[in-house]
Image: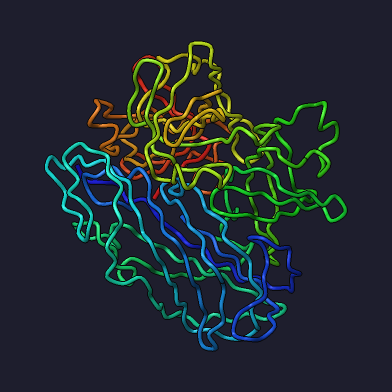
Amino acid sequence: MSRVPLKCTIVLLVASAALASCGGRGVSSGGGGSTGTAPVVLTMTDTPPSNVSLLSAEVTLTGATLGPGNVSLFSGATTIELTRLQTDIAYISTTLVPSGSYTSLALTFSNPTLTIENDTGSSLVTGGSNPACISSAICTIQSVATNLSTTIMLSPTMTVSATSGAGLLADVNLNNLLSATLGADFKNGVTVSEFTPAGSGAPPVGAEDVVGHVTTTDATHSKFSLQNAVGMVSLTVDNTTTFLNFPTGTCTTPSIACVQANQILSVDISIRADGTPVARNVLFEDADSSDIEVEGIITSTGSLTFKMVTLAESDSALTASLPIGSTATVTYTGSTPFNVDFTHADSTQIATTGFLFSLSADLIVGQQVQVRRNPNSSGNSITADRVRLRSSRVSGIFQSGTTSLFSLNNLPSLFTSRGTLQIQVQTSNPTICSGTVSCSTLAATHSDSVRGPLFANSGSPTLVASKVIQH
């Protein structure tokens, strides 16, 4: 079965005005030893090899430099989980750079790690010191890299100034990046295109659905900091921010006052033309961060248990004992609450009326769920205080149907090896399609990446889409 490509994109947004540092994974000064006046924003999105279900893909970005002048766009290191980014964008940082013309972009990566299900029908030799991944097994492998860095010439030359900015979109294509043995060559798999920040064709948001816990709030400057397993981001709240699902007792008037330390939130991040990261949508998840939220994709189900590959954690405290990309066994009881995430497209809630997620029978392989981890849990054995259905990200071919209800075929082998040959995709007025608010231009036989809660739906799995990207 041929695999539908999943874009993996790093967005480097060069905006047009000076911006003061806001700390954490926020704004920092530019590299090259000079003071910058134009902010640069880094973000990241996902294409796996044929006949392999890529359950998790991580890579660490260790450097991004503009030339000439060796102007650093990023310092330190940040690790990104890519599979969720087939429909989303991950915000990394904003950095001030000097005005001028730039002809090249150098990117440096490290530690590419993959968690796969081997559905090739035979053992998969993955190179280096990795053991062979036997047929049907779920394996985490360290990808052996031929080249961990690449320098891409910019054509046309990118010019930025205090009054005129530019943006760079760097695409990491896993089909080109990975060899037959899942070795990585970043010179082969990365391309770059230019766009105008906050203009036509620019990414509408800097990141979507970022879950973490609030560490600090600054009501005076309308800012807060959000921490999770991969780092911290400092965000501004302004008149474009919406507050969703907050208890009325703690959020009588939507404002920065709703955000309190130790809350667990899910945040969509937008980027202004001047590079400022803004909390566009702020969704309340939990009032207390003591029970860490762990998100993952279900790989098998059993009696009051299921296994999942972890994709996100609301706190870094688990990363040593439960790294992202590892398999966790989740145990729950008959009284453990099941519920559906407050799913929204931009600031509008997606209707899930008529779809159920309340019992063991509603769990299926391929769903993305979030479990509230009881502190009595240990390592990769999680006792769940709650199981919440989150948005799955799935790519396939629009096979047949209408633009409001169509079948998605040519699915990842995680689905097809278990008899799920197609998923029904339901769209509605709030669904974001190909970056617009209308889905009327969706067409059959095209490859699509869809995001939304996936319901078992009595043996006919249906994804209620908050977003559809037609490639």
Q: Is residue 20 above or below residue 229?
A: below
**Residue 355 visible here:** no
Expressed as whole percent of the image width and height from the top left, the position of residue 136 reads: 20, 36
How far from the left and from the top, in percent, is residue 228? 59, 47
In this view, which residue lies farthest toward the left? 122
Q: Relative to residue 239, is residue 184 drawn left or right?
A: left
Q: Residue at x 74, y 46 (%)?
A: 241
Q: Quadrant of the N terminus?
A: top left
Residue found 13% across the figure and 39% down from its top: 121
Q: For this view, does 140 lie left or right of residue 100?
A: left
Q: As drawn, which residue projects farthest toward the right? A: 220
Q: Is residue 119 visible?
A: yes
Q: What residue is drawn where x is 52% and y is 15%?
A: 354
Among the 4 quarters of the image, the one containing residue 212: top right
The x, y position of residue 81, in whole percent, is 45, 51
Left or right of residue 38: residue 440 = left
Camera-nearest residue between 143 and 235: 143
